[in-house]
Image (cartoon, helix red, strand yellow):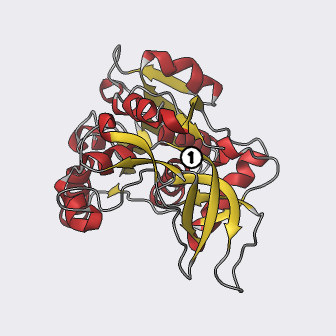
Amino acid sequence: MKAIIQDRYGKADTLKLDDVEPPVPDATSVLLRVRSASVNSLDSQIMSGRPILLRLLGFGLTRPKRRIRGVDVAGEVVAVPKSDSHFKVGDSVFGIGSGTFAEYVAADEREITTKPDGVSFDDAATLGVAACTALLAVRDRGRLRPGQSVAITGAGSGVGTFAVQLAKWMGARVTAVTRADNLEMLRALGADKVIDYDKGDFTCGPDRFDVVFDISGLNSTRTLLGTLRPGGTLVIVGGRGAFGRFLSAGLRRRILRQRVYGLLARAKADDLAQLATLVAEGRIKPAIEHVYSLSEVPVAIARAELRRARGKLVIHVA
């Protein structure tokens, strides 16, 4: 099969299209023909081997342990190893796999679910890492309630565009902080207020928030905590220096009793199904900047490395 492989840590120029053997699913997996995939910041982190903690967690000390990049996937089941599987050959599914920038991938049954007929493969491929992260942030960490005031930094990112829509769906008033070229997009996605971070620092304004979701990492934890109302919650979702800020969040919560949380999300079939239903009903819509071919994955990754992508970058495989 054709796949995008990487044999040494580095940037997008370490990726190449090559012929490799298709994966063999184990007892908990099914084999998918990949129709679409999408790019996440996680892909760039694994590619670079940074932070070093990733290498120590089993991604490979001196070079990537797994050669094929990509985690988000939407496709069709072509092989089912066990007779009591939830899926059958021909089912259209989506979710998470390991090495999805390829024509075939083995995916754990617990991390995929059936794709509704009204959702395209391209749209479904965006609902893995980014949409699940946004859902867990607003529902489980932020515990949003109708009428609450929310600020979302990095709102033009893949996670951010989903977070804005999910927060609105849950009844919150949303302030989206982003670059100038994302303002109209975020208004169209439902944000009540948009702020160009190059023209104004939302942390210096008069507004105070019940919940702040920090995706960009451009402000310090202390500064963001200062934007909260009494009893408010800060959720650190990602951005620059995310791992260090996750550790800081844990210390602040345990020692200073501050309501600050780090979030490392994991996709679950039930959450994926809920997100797909919201898309099928028109309640949320994946914001896709561009669709690339499989051979163009290095171009898409290079675009993502600039941190300038508007929403999601999709890889159309078949």
Q: What residue is drawn where x is 25% and y is 45%?
A: 48
Q: What residue is drawn where x is 48% and y is 54%?
A: 71
Measured from the top left, where is residue 240 in percent x and y? 26, 40
Measured from the top left, where is residue 211 in percent x and y? 44, 46
Determine whether 72 is above or below 60 in the image: above
- Which residue lies under the disc numbered 1? 37
The foreground one among 189 and 40 is 40
The foreground one among 301 and 116 is 301
Q: Amino acid at mark 1?
A: Ala
Determine whether 105 is above or below 3 in the image: below
Q: What residue is drawn where x is 27% and y is 67%?
A: 58
Residue that extends furthest to the right in the rendered view of this protein = 117
Is residue 81 found left or right of 296 in the rendered image? right
Quadrant location of the C terminus? top right
Q: What residue is drawn where x is 28% and y is 62%?
A: 59
Is residue 92 found left or right of 19 in the rendered image? right
Measured from the top left, where is residue 217 in percent x and y? 29, 38
Q: Quadrant of residue 62?
A: bottom left
Is residue 16 found left or right of 287 in the rendered image? left
Residue 151 at least partly seen: yes
Measured from the top left, where is residue 85 in percent x and y? 69, 80
Q: Quadrant of residue 152?
A: top left
Determine whether 299 is above or below 103 in the image: above
